Image (tube, rainbow, N blue to C red):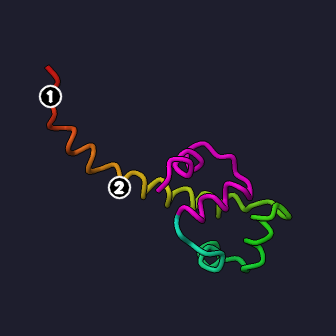
């Protein structure tokens, strides 16, 4: 997961460009995201080309997945650092 996608997932904005960034960072194609969002493939294409407003609920679904994966990726670091004592 890249840092840019993690920041977008936390702070937005909700738009077609950030939707595309989140999708790509998750390694999903347009068809997969369309199924997740329960919309037509063409609708996702319109969002990403800024021809239509992104459905907020669909954007937050992707953002939540990015946040979850980022948190999981950081867990081992938190566990390792919990045993380090600074004198």
Q: Quadrant of the C terminus?
A: top left
Q: Quadrant of residue 48?
A: bottom right
Q: Is residue 14 above or below residue 41?
A: above
> Which numbered disc, 1 or 2, marks the residue that appears first in the sequence?
2
In the rendered structure, which segment of residues is drawn in magenta? Answer: 1-25
| Count of numbered tags | 2
Nearer to the camera, 5 or 71: 5
Residue furthest top in the image = 87
Q: Is residue 49 above or below residue 74?
A: below
Give residue 12's position: percent from left, percent from top: 64, 46
The local secondary structure at tag 2 comes to helix
Instruction: Tell me, yes or no, whether the highlighted magenta stretch contains residue 36.
Output: no
Label 2 environment density (alpha carbons within 10 Å; few <14, some 14–19, many ≥20) = few
Give residue 84's position: percent from left, percent from top: 16, 33
Nearer to the camera, 58 or 6: 6
Q: CA separation, marks 1 and 2?
A: 23 Å
Nearer to the camera, 23 or 39: 23
Q: Is residue 5 above or below residue 29?
A: above
Give residue 26's position: percent from left, percent from top: 52, 65
Please give the label number shown on residue 70. none
The local secondary structure at tag 1 comes to loop
Magenta: main secondary structure equals helix
Label 1 environment density (alpha carbons within 10 Å; few <14, some 14–19, many ≥20) = few
Residue at 56% x, 72% y: name it: 28
Instruction: Tell me, yes or no, whether the highlighted magenta stretch contains residue 19.
Output: yes
Residue at 60% x, 48% y: name it: 8
Identify the residue position indicated by label 1 in the image.
85
Give residue 43's position: percent from left, percent from top: 77, 73
Identify the residue position indicated by label 2 in the image.
72
Q: Is residue 61 left or right of residue 56?
A: left
């Amino acid at each position: 997961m890249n840092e840019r996608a993690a920041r977008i997932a936390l702070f937005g904005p909700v738009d077609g460009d950030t939707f595309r960034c989140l999708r790509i960072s998750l390694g999903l194609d347009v068809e997969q995201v369309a199924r997740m969002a329960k919309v037509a493939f063409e609708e996702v294409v319109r969002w990403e080309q800024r021809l239509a407003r992104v459905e907020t609920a669909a954007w937050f679904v992707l953002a939540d997945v990015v946040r979850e994966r980022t948190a999981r990726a950081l867990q081992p670091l938190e566990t390792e650092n919990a045993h380090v004592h600074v004198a």
